[in-house]
Image: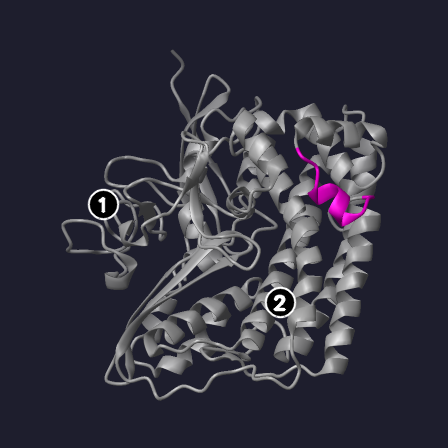
Amino acid sequence: MDTPTRLVVGPFNRVEGDLEVRLDVQAGRVASAEVVAPMYRGFENLLEGRAPHDALVIVPRICGICSVSQSVAAARALADAAGVTPPPNGRIVTDLMLATENLADHLTHFYLFFMPDFAREVYAHEPWFGEVQRRFEAGRGEQARAAIAARQRWFQIIGTLGGKWPHTHSVVPGGSARAIDAAERLRLLAQVREFRAFLERHTFGAPLEEVAALPDEAALQAWHAADPGRGDLRLFLTVAAGTGLDRLGRGPGRYLTHGNASAPAGLWDEATGGVQVPDLAGVTEDLSHAWLADDSPAPRHPSAGLTRPDADKPGAYTWNKAPRLAGRSVETGAIARRLMAGQPLVRAAVARGGGTVYTRVLARLLELATVLSQMEGWLAQIRPGDAFCASEAPLTQGRGCGLTEAARGALGHWVHIDNGRIAGYQIVAPTSWNFSPRDAAGQPGPLEAALVGTPVLSGERTPVAVQHVVRSFDPCMVCTVH
């Protein structure tokens, strides 16, 4: 048997933050993997001792890509501690800002992070290579440039709803600090429809409702075959079929979402093929292989979590903790939301091949088609003149949990307030789940498991297939090492 060869891949380009992947390669395939978050930032410790509402200013700075998601989780944690319920207008505005950011992330991932890898010379022999280069080549692709322009205009929605992006301060425990009048609501609807026009012309080459309603993979294949050159989703399907993306990067088979306005909370397990209600009391953070000290005999729940750096800890290889649900690793992201929302095509694709590079990207694109249509309905529900924010008393004591969905998946904030100050603050971000290290039992994180079996071509120092698997999870490392 061949002796495994150690290969270190990183840093990765087109990734928010620092990432390194250590691979043991045997017989041309990954035999095992360690996913390394090499940067420590310490936001959780930075928050301790501060006034509770300081979190609303500090946590959005964790990341410029998903700052609204962090704001929403913090506001919900403080609202939970204070017993405050936002009025309907405040909830709707928050949902709209969160959806705007998440859909922008999906657009960015597809056009700027994921598809440019297929314009690399390793694929020059493929019949689709020239078209992929024309559309997606990094810095040059026609469709990539068009997506950047559309993304810039799309973010004007958050400018109207929240005052600015990133790091808007309008998301508060009581709802939204900025009221929307009737004229602004009409302008917002026009901006949503402008983005719809971009997606229908460029991304899908078809009405959004037509794409979202595709019932299974046979219907998807027929839709693709009817006009294979029309729209970027169809080109992705051509590339996926030619490169076996539906067989690459299979994850643990368990999918967690905290839920949002477009999908209920829940756990989807491939083994049972059905929905489960997760007991979040069973969420723990294992520190066995993290450069973090802990004197607890068992992994802690985030509400009692600690973040104590220990850079010389034996056996550690990352700053990321290892979140587990009932002791098991779970994957999170758009694929979890679409499964829980009952998207028939995603459920069919996962039933056939599991969570793979193909199904993760497909789920994001279908979420673009689905949620944008829903946003038009949410805008219609805003009632100008009604309250957008509930008042709250000064918060001196309490504990709270704030759950939401960032583009990359389940995000949770846990806060403990004592004598008017933050006594403890813990964050479990989506990439913390997906890029977690091994736990005390040796169970790998979702990406570590998904990389096993990935092909490595002779002479590759940065294996292209490994990059496809990593990018399919859309890492945001600065959130991971908060």
In the rendered picture of this protein, how many numbered marks are placed on residues?
A: 2
Q: Pointer 2: residues within 10 angstroms few (<14), some, or many (20+)?
A: many
Question: Residue 213 lies in magenta, yes or no?
Answer: yes
Q: Residue at x 15, y 54 (%)?
A: 296
Residue situated in front as seen by the camera: 333 or 376: 376
Q: Is residue 376 above or below residue 212?
A: below
**Disc number placed over residue 96 in the picture, else none:** 2
Q: Residue at x 22, y 45 (%)?
A: 314
* Kind of residue sitting beneath label 2: Leu
Q: Is residue 395 above or below residue 187?
A: below
- 357 sits to left or right of 372: left
**Quadrant hosting residue 233:** top right
Dot 1: what SS?
Answer: loop
Point out the tag, 1 or 2, that comes first from the N-terminus. 2
The magenta region covers 205-215
- How far from the left and from the top, in percent, is residue 256? 43, 46
In this view, the mark in front (1 or 2): 2
| Circle 1 residue | 314
